[in-house]
């Protein structure tokens, strides 16, 4: 558990304020590039602190706080969008927008970054360098990072390093996780249509059964991970939907499959995609079926800068209990990867789960929540990063 003495009193006193901010964003979740209210609240909040703001990428906000003393330019990023999930919890701050929910913690990310802005806004006389606050729309599959980068969020003045955090209910409150190099997966999506020949279920010899072909295929492609990839490299092939058939004694003409593919290395994702079609072609040919396949890219692998991340880990060593400092990868995807392709930086996770409080549901679950004690911890970590990297 984190030593509470490691969070300075001036940040601890912000705890209630941070909770109020987070709960407000949680009650009014908005989907990617539709974060109109969210964007307005952030913009007005920063302006009231005297921080220069600029609206870009439809609903994105960047704030720039210049210190009175010379130093570097670093960027801190928070994603703003919610998920198309109906919240089923009974908390007082439950989503008021039907079909939308902050089920990934982006509401906490916004509150934490606003807390950092509030902290430094009254300390510009001693602030060395410039802090760029990046509030990004559309992280959940819309790739909002692309638009933010294209519109210049890392320029004028050029950012020297960038940092991002993610609250994580899988890890207990007071834990910290990051590592140099790849930490999140390269992602892609697959959509397949297997086309057979319809007929009566009692006379399969007169048909080409696409369900049987699909079953063979789903089983066969798992060997791509277990037998084609290096066992030391992580990869995932998951089919999330199968649509086909209309009646128990009818063989329909086609089946549709959709799924996700993941790999810790970009080159392995490209290999998996190639093998997916090669195996499909062979199995369909063996059964006399036809196919259509659509393979699309998601996000690149998120690769932390070696030097920057080792410095962040030293900061964490002083703040977190050593038993709660983790070095793990996750097969989740994140468009923060594209910031790291432009400038060096580090992405890290802070534990926000607490079984004793019933905070135990994973990200993207309709009952997801966080232990809000994570909010001042996140602010403290970002503040320490600024103090160490700006001079």
Image: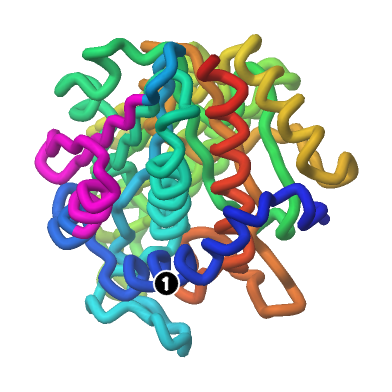
Looking at the image, is 336 positioned above or below residue 158? below
Q: Which residues are magenta?
A: 41-66
Looking at the image, is 160 positioned above or below residue 315? above
Between residues 370 and 1, which one lies in front from this camera angle? 1
Q: Quadrant of residue 325?
A: top right
Left or right of 125 on screen, residue 293:
left
SS at badge 1: helix
User: Residue 46 appears at what percent x and percent y?
Assistant: 26, 48
Verify whether residue 233 appears in magenta: no
Q: Quadrant of residue 26?
A: bottom left
Left or right of 199 on screen, residue 163:
right
Q: Say which residue appears at 86% left-offset and 45% top-offset.
A: 321
Q: Quadrant of residue 383?
A: top right
Between residues 9 and 115, which one lies in front from this camera angle? 9
Looking at the image, is 167 positioned above or below residue 266? below
Between residues 330 and 50, which one lies in front from this camera angle? 50
């Amino acid at each position: 558990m984190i030593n509470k003495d490691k969070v300075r009193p001036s940040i601890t006193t912000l705890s209630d304020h941070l909770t109020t901010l987070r709960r407000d964003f949680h009650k009014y979740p908005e989907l990617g590039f539709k974060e109109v209210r969210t964007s307005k609240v952030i913009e007005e909040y920063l302006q009231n602190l005297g921080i220069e703001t600029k609206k870009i990428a439809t609903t994105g906000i960047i704030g720039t706080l210049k210190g009175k003393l010379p130093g570097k330019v670093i960027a801190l990023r928070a994603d703003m969008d919610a998920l198309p999930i109906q919240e089923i919890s009974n908390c007082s701050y439950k989503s008021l927008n039907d079909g939308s929910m902050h089920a990934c913690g982006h509401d906490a990310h916004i509150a934490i970054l606003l807390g950092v802005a509030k902290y430094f806004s009254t300390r510009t006389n001693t602030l060395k360098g410039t802090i760029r606050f990046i509030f990004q729309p559309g992280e959940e599959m819309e790739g909002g990072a692309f638009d933010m980068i294209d519109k210049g969020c890392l320029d004028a003045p050029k950012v020297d390093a960038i940092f991002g955090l993610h609250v994580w209910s899988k890890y207990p409150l007071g834990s910290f996780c990051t590592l140099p190099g790849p930490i999140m997966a390269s992602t892609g999506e697959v959509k397949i249509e297997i086309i057979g020949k319809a007929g009566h279920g009692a006379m399969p010899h007169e048909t080409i059964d696409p369900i049987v072909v699909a079953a063979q295929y789903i089983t066969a492609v798992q060997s791509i991970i277990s037998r084609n990839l290096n066992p030391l490299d992580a990869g995932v092939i998951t089919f999330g939907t199968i649509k086909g058939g209309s009646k128990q004694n009818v063989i329909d003409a086609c089946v549709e499959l959709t799924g996700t593919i993941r790999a810790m290395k970009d080159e392995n994702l490209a290999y998996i995609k190639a093998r997916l079609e090669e195996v499909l072609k062979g199995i369909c040919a063996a059964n006399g079926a036809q196919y259509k396949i659509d393979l699309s890219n998601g996000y690149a692998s998120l690769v932390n800068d070696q030097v920057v991340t080792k410095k962040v880990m030293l900061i964490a060593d002083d703040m977190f209990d050593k038993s709660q400092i983790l070095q793990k990868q996750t097969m989740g995807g994140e468009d923060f990867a594209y910031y790291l392709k432009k400038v060096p930086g580090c992405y890290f996770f802070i534990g926000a789960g607490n079984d004793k409080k019933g905070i135990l549901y994973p990200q993207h679950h309709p009952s997801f929540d966080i232990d809000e004690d994570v909010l001042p911890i996140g602010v403290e970590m970002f503040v320490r990063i600024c103090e160490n990297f700006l001079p």
